[in-house]
Image (spheres, rainbow, N blue to C red):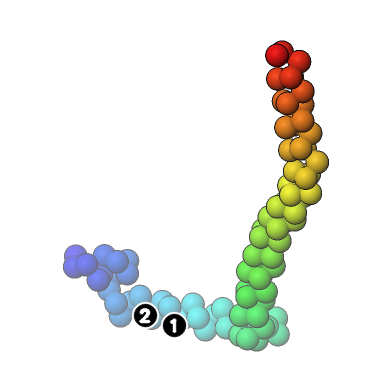
Amino acid sequence: MNGVTQFLGGSPLSVLIRLVILSVVVGFILAWLDIRPMELVDWIVGLFEWAWTSIFGSLNRAVDYFLLGAVIVVPLFLLSRLLKTANRG
């Protein structure tokens, strides 16, 4: 068995025939469902855009919340450490 046959999982001609038949069947089903190729591509692109916005949009909000909280928390922490050091000395 050569490398191409092993990679494809069969002889190139038989794989090509199976892919053609499968493509026609899937194309028939998509046409029956009235789904056009560009609609499918747009849906996939929209899915990735939604995922990107959801993940990194949430991270942007998390950074905003962190900075907003840090404006209060860090000075209070430093003040408490200074007061603790002053009380010891």
What residue is pinned by disc 2?
Answer: 16
**Which of 21/78 is in front?**
78
- The residue located at (69%, 65%) in the rendering is 53
Outermost residue toward the top? 88
Q: Nearer the viewer, residue 49 or 1?
A: 49
On screen, 42 above or below 51?
below
Q: Are marks 2 and 1 in contact (CB under 8 Å)?
A: yes
What residue would you read off at disc 1?
Answer: 20
Q: Quadrant of the C terminus?
A: top right
Residue 64: x and y, percent?
Answer: 75, 54
Q: Residue 80 at what x, y percent from top left?
A: 77, 26
Instruction: Report the residue at 63% width, 75% height from top.
Output: 45
Displayed quadrant of residue 55: bottom right
The residue carrying pointer 1 sits among few (fewer than 14), some (14 to 19) or many (20 or more) residues within 10 Å by Cα, namely few
Determine whether 48 is above or below 42 in the image: above
For the N terminus, which image quadrant?
Answer: bottom left
Q: Is residue 73 left or right of residue 56?
A: right
Mark 1: secondary structure: helix
| Picture residue at 75% right of the left edge, 43% below the top | 70
Classify mark 2: residues with Cα within 10 Å, few (<14), some (14-19) or many (20+): few
Mark 2 element type = helix
Residue drawn at x 76%, y 37% is: 75
Amino acid under disc 2 = Leu
Which circle marks residue 63 in the picture?
none
Q: Is residue 88 above or below residue 64?
A: above
Q: How many marks?
A: 2
Three-letter code, disc 1: Val
- How far is mark 2 from mark 1, CA to CA? 6 Å
* Residue 43 sits in quarter: bottom right
